[in-house]
Amino acid sequence: MTPSPVPGRPGGPADAAGPPPSWALLDVATALVGATTRAEVVERVLRAGLPTTGATGGAVLLGAPGEGTSALRWSAPSLAPETLDVGGAPPPDDDLPECASARTGRVVAAVTAAEVARRFPRVVGEGAAVAAVPLRVRGSVLGALRATWTAPPPDEAAVLLEALGALAAQALARVAADEQRDRALAEVEDARARLGVLSEVGRVLAAATSSSGEGTGTALGGTAAADAEVLETAAVDRSVGELARLVVPALADWCLVLLVDEHGRWREGGAAHRDPARSGEVAALGRATVRGRGVGAALSDPVRARRPLVVERMTEEVLRAALPDAATAAAFRALEPHGTVVLPLGVRGRTVGSMLLVTTGERGPHTAAEVETATEVARRAGAALDAAALFRAQKRLAEGLQRSMLTPPPRLERLEVAVRYEPSARRAEVGGDWYDVLVQPTGSPVVVIGDVMGHDVEAAAAMGQLRSLLRGIAYTTDEPPDAVLTRTDAAMAGLGLTTTATALVGRLDDLGPRGWRLVWSNAGHPPPVVLRADGRAEVPATTHDLLLGVRPTTQRNPVSTLLSPGDVLVLCTDGLLERRDQGLDVGQARLLEALSALPADVRGSAQRLCDVVLEACAPGPREDDVALVAVRVL
């Protein structure tokens, strides 16, 4: 048999002692996981990786396409990097095996001393055999790895060398991605440092958007929407007030911010004076401007035109044109205006407010740098305020749509039912979480909890369809939960409802004074929890079947347990249990712990139980939507 051109291939020379075991590369892979720089990757490949192939030396060549005109090469044992002036990477000179391998993207090898001397004279004396493998990741060649042997290489050398090259390439790609991410983060930090005041403005204005959805979810009905609107408006006003304080005295001696509501009416925003004792005068001027005759053409025209207005000196003529109301003009004059800049706050052709920056006589007019920075502040403020308004509008629409599809539960004899739907505080999106409570024609109450995959309009639409479909099947067929889920799966397939969802359907059969028998079937949903009358919380069964929408012929299985008087059935979606730092199992244990710790007066009210459990297991701001149902046996 002709010897293989790659050392260690079948038919090639072999080391009588045998190669190191292939599992030795596991230690190398573990070591590479902790490498954070290219140099660390190279060092661990050469020092720890090459010995697994039986090699006595080697080198790593790293090309730098598009980043310069050179490439780096490290050689064992010194590991000192050499800069090869090759006019681009990968290098073109093929008298080094790693150069040829990097250029061609193929394995290059010479397995005898004579072949080494003929093909690669620059490595003569380093060994009797040499091979190089490309460092390839997703079709891109990052460089090459060379190994040299002073004796004929072992049989497994080729396989081990190629595996080592693959590990090295993956580690280098990961390090490169990390470095790119770190460079991007560093650029962001440098930009923030250069912007100075603007960075603080961005931080403050971010609160106008981020706080819009926090802590506003409640049960169906009540005054939740009105309360949420008040909280959101207050959050925006706080941000605008802090914005006014941030630009004083850096950009002006005093500042007044006015906002435009969704009906086009002006309202007060923020006010600040470099002398805190006079900030109230600025705020009073804002109230007078909004409630009086308003601003004149000198101030309103630039706002309508969405361009800044710079007044180097506020003369009486300009003042009368700006504020035609005498009382408002007098309040303005009392604040000793000198230079004035009127900046519209708006984005996408819509005005959301204006910012008035004023200097006094001691300071003089605004400098060009102050105007430039103030213009950028106004641009950011307008964008943030518009985003906050859009976020609130979208969130109200999303929550309204979601709640419109979640009907209140019916009144049931000898059962108290409480339901909650809590939207995510971090998204202005509709979700796929739902619950349902209905009574079948035979009089048995049915409780449903489910979660359609996704958080978008399509998920909400699919949720609405699936909820209605399951609700109709549960009512019209009057069948047990497992049959309801089976029919729902078949209907989804037949009607082309292409979505997947978890769902749990439970039916309560009346046993008279003994209580109720709960029969349920679970399609991949978190299991039900029962809080017993004596305060013990337990999961009756954790078994579940396949999700809805995966395989229409899935066999559904029923499970049952007894609910005695005083027991509470608790059903929830994974938003109550799961977080970024907490898996479902931990969340389930936390729910059981929270339920077991409830005092008797809370256990005796399904409504209070829901409130306490939500606060204990999913305190706001919530990362995901939460649907929760509690059914207490009276």
Image (cartoon, grey):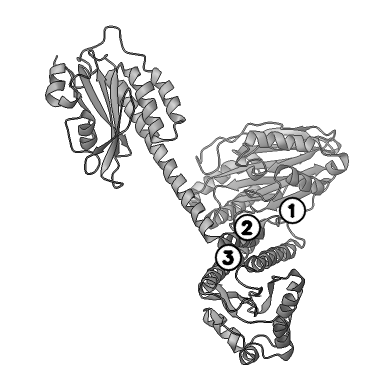
Give percent across and percent down for residue 194. 51, 58
Which labelled disc corresponds to residue 384? 3
Crowd band around label 1 with a 10 angstrom C-alpha radius: few (<14), some (14–19), many (20+): some
> In which quadrant of the rendered image does the C terminus lie?
top right
Q: Secondary structure at mark 2?
A: helix
Q: Residue furthest right?
A: 601
Residue 588 relative to residue 547: left or right: right
Location of residue 280 by image quarter:
bottom right
Specify which label sits upstream in the sequence, 2 or 1.
Answer: 2
Count of all numbered marks drawn on residues in the image: 3
Give percent across and percent down for residue 446. 71, 45
> Does residue 444 show up?
no
The residue carrying mark 1 is 409
> Does residue 2 show up?
yes
The residue carrying mark 2 is 210
> In which quadrant of the rendered image does the N terminus lie?
top left
Determine the CA span between mark 3 and mark 2.
10 Å
Which is more toward the observer, 416 or 116? 116
Crowd band around label 3 with a 10 angstrom C-alpha radius: few (<14), some (14–19), many (20+): many
Report the amino acid beneath label 3: Ala
Give percent across and percent down for residue 438. 71, 50
Instruction: Please give the name of the residue rendered at 64% of the width and 54% of the height, measured from the top-left corner.
Output: 425
Determine the CA span between mark 2 and mark 1.
32 Å
Crowd band around label 2 with a 10 angstrom C-alpha radius: few (<14), some (14–19), many (20+): some
